[in-house]
Image (cartoon, grey):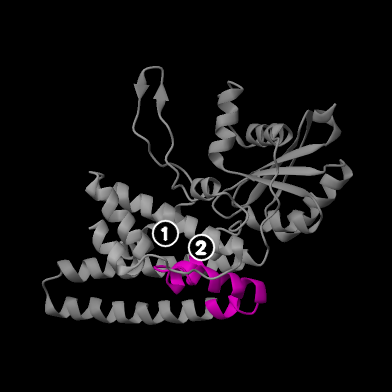
Amino acid sequence: MSKHSIICAGIDTGKHKLDVALDGCPEQLEIDNTADGHAALSAWLKRHCVKRVGIEASGGYEQDVVAQLRCDDFVVVVFQPTQVRAYARFLLQRAKNDKIDAALIAACTAAIKKIHAPPDPRLAPLAARMTLIEQLTDQIAGYKAYRESCRDPRGQQFWKAEITRYNALLRAELKELVAAIRQHRDLAERLELIESVDGVGLKTAVAILVRMPELGRLTRGQAAALAGLAPFDDDSATHVGVRHIAGGRERLRGALYNAALAAAFQWNPQLIAFYRRLTAAGRPHKYALVACARKLLIFVNTVVERGTPWVSTASPSAIKKAA
């Protein structure tokens, strides 16, 4: 009964077109991935009494239609590609084309047990601007590598000028993004709480804010898993494998790792002591840094959950003892 009480649709997204299928029904639709196409799609879904729509994340080409469908009061589930392919393997389905994928996504949508609330719509444009800042950061790192390997004085001057120009662009973009965040009182308060944690700079705080809107409503384990910083077991029978991290939000994890790299050596007394304790016990440098990134995220999650700024509790003497 429950399987058929809600009519579900699946959408396979392409750059120029959308393939749409209904779960348990042969009728399908192919429509342009444009604003007019989205309006026609919404009307078609309403005619078929669809309540829940599944769509696969596809390099951002799905974002406009997802926004339109949510605006039209459909429950929209955005799947990661690995989820859809895993469901296909579960069904032993090897055939793959756009229409088959749309039907597969519809079946996956009908089978899903837990549906998360849609993200805060204010964060999508902020996340896009944060991505631009991260791309500028990557460009600067690349230009520094070019300058380092260049032996021609003229080439070195060129890369130096480019680094200076991109740094100015980076600072301007970050300033505008922070100003946009501070137009919303609740987001501004959350940003200040995140930034209050020792070792979390403004850029990292913005990345955490826009990349993890669930912050403060998660357990420490859930927060670590979403960021891809939770160590997973790899055991079977008598085999005991090495714990490892996997999956999660890559850009968020990178921001936390970079912050932990500095915080564990200079800015956060708790993380300095924690890092030294792990390395003294024989843990590798990278293992200890990943553990510090996970603990830093837990600190931030706790601060946001409690609604009170961070208070450092470790004394300099405690850090010396840990050494």
Residue 99 drawn at (x, y percent): 66, 35
- Quadrant showing the C terminus: bottom left
In front here: 310 or 127?
A: 310
Residue 69 drawn at (x, y percent): 76, 54
Tag 1–tag 2 contact (CB < 8 Å): yes
Q: Residues within 10 Å of mark 1 (few under 14, many from 20)?
A: many
Which residue occupies 27% across, 70% down?
Answer: 143
- What is the secondary structure assignment of the residue under circle 2? helix
Part of the protein shown in magenta: 178-207
Q: Main secondary structure of the magenta part?
A: helix
Q: CA distance from mark 1 to mark 2?
A: 8 Å
Q: Quadrant of residue 216?
A: bottom right
Q: Is residue 279 visible?
A: yes
The image's mark for residue 127 is: none
- Tell me the kind of residue under disc 1: Leu
- Residue 192 located within the stretch drawn in magenta: yes
Which residue occupies 69% across, 54% down?
Answer: 118
- What is the secondary structure assignment of the residue under circle 1? helix
- Quadrant showing the N terminus: top right
Q: Quadrant of residue 193?
A: bottom right
Which residue occupies 70% across, 43% down?
Answer: 115
In front here: 258 or 180?
A: 258
- Residue 264 located within the stretch drawn in magenta: no
Q: Given the current orientation, which residue lies at the most extreme top position?
A: 237
Q: Residues within 10 Å of mark 2 (few under 14, many from 20)?
A: many
- Tell me the kind of residue under disc 2: Ile
**In this picture, is 136 found above or below 80?**
below
In this picture, residue 114 sits left or right of residue 305: right
Q: Which residue is mark 2?
A: 208
Which residue occupies 54% across, 52% down?
Answer: 59
In this picture, residue 307 sits left or right of residue 313: right
Q: Which residue is mark 1?
A: 256
